[in-house]
Amino acid sequence: MTRAADVLQEAVKALGDLTVPDVATEVPIDAALAHHDEAELRFFLYAGLFALLAEAVADGETPEMAGDGAGVTEEQLEGSLRMVRSAEPGVRYARFERRDATERRELMARMRGREIAVTSEWLIPRLDADIHAYRARIAALQDAIARAGDGPR
Amino acid sequence: MSPSVHLLADDWERLRRVYPDRDDRDLARTALALGRKAADAPFEIRVPPNLPKRERVQRLIVMLARSAGGVAVQRFRLVRDRERDARAERVEALTYERHLELDKDVVPPLKLEAKRLRAELRRLEEEAGSLGIDVEAIEPRISWPETIAVDGYEPPKYETNDERRRTAVAFFRRVGGA
């Protein structure tokens, strides 16, 4: 039998677990909401999801809860709220830190990518061309000097 | 295709376990309505103790929903961005290695060779001039302003960890001996 109180507890505990699987599911919404901001809708859905779990705990309304005496309880909800509040700073910090690190890495990669492109596509071909020209002129100069040395003595 | 919003599968599954007889669309509609209501409710840190029990529970539900919703969306992004994070790390490492390879193994030998050839070329031009040869008439000529100036070039020095350690030890010996 599913006890809503256990599920709520599990859901709240999972909020602070950053290693949860990243598998997502598509939750269908009404067509009229199709153009709403997805992040905002996600917040509403999540807030509503927790409200529904908490209501099930508070009312014992779901068929599974009937008669299990899960009466409920302000204390349980207060305990869940405390857990959420204690998880919040860690999750926010982890998100900020991870996003910051990723954005820095992406920026570094873009900057280096530009430098690599300039080096590979401009500097190296230019140096190769210069070296080729120097060698050709050195050969011509050596030839001229040799011919001058072979001249009338 | 009907519109949808992504949530973590485990999170949604929990709701379905508690409401097994309701379909996803119905649950989503109710969740959206309750979520909006929680978002619109006045912000409270704690429930006033003098309210009737039913009202206190309702207020707690709203507070819990709003707080948990906020944390859940942060965790959703954090978890779903794992792939992006890993890709950024991979690409950054790759560009670092390629950049280092070019700066350490590819460009310095070319610049040193160009520097050596420029010096050799100038020496030969001087020698030819001293033999009475008109060096300007010798083809091919070099358009110097269009070349890359490398005469003062010195290759960058890359230290190994051992070299860094030796430098640090020498420094502390010096400081300690002062």
Image (tube, rainbow, N blue to C red):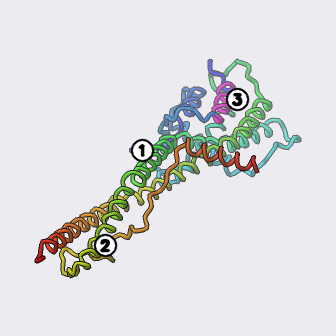
Q: Residue furthest right?
A: B50
Q: Is residue A39 above or below residue A118?
A: above
Local crowd size for mark 3, using a 10 Å CA cut-off: few (<14), some (14–19), many (≥20): many
Task: Give the amino acid at mark 2.
Answer: Arg
Local crowd size for mark 1, using a 10 Å CA cut-off: few (<14), some (14–19), many (≥20): few
Q: Residue furthest front?
A: A153
Per the image, label 1 sits on a secondary structure element best described as loop
Quick one: A98 or B143, which is closer to the camera?
B143
* Chain designation of label 3: A
Residue named by callout 3: A57
Quick one: A135 or B11, which is closer to the camera?
A135
Horizontal and vertical percent position of residue A85? 73, 40
Q: Are marks 2 and 1 in contact (CB under 8 Å)?
A: no
Q: Are marks 2 and 1 on the same chain?
A: yes
Position of B42 with respect to B119 (left or right) is right
In percent of the image, x 36 and y 53: which residue is there? B106
Quarter occupied by residue B127: bottom left
Per the image, label 2 sits on a secondary structure element best described as helix
Residue named by callout 2: B122
In percent of the image, x 73 and y 50: which residue is there? B175
Task: Give the amino acid at mark 3.
Answer: Val
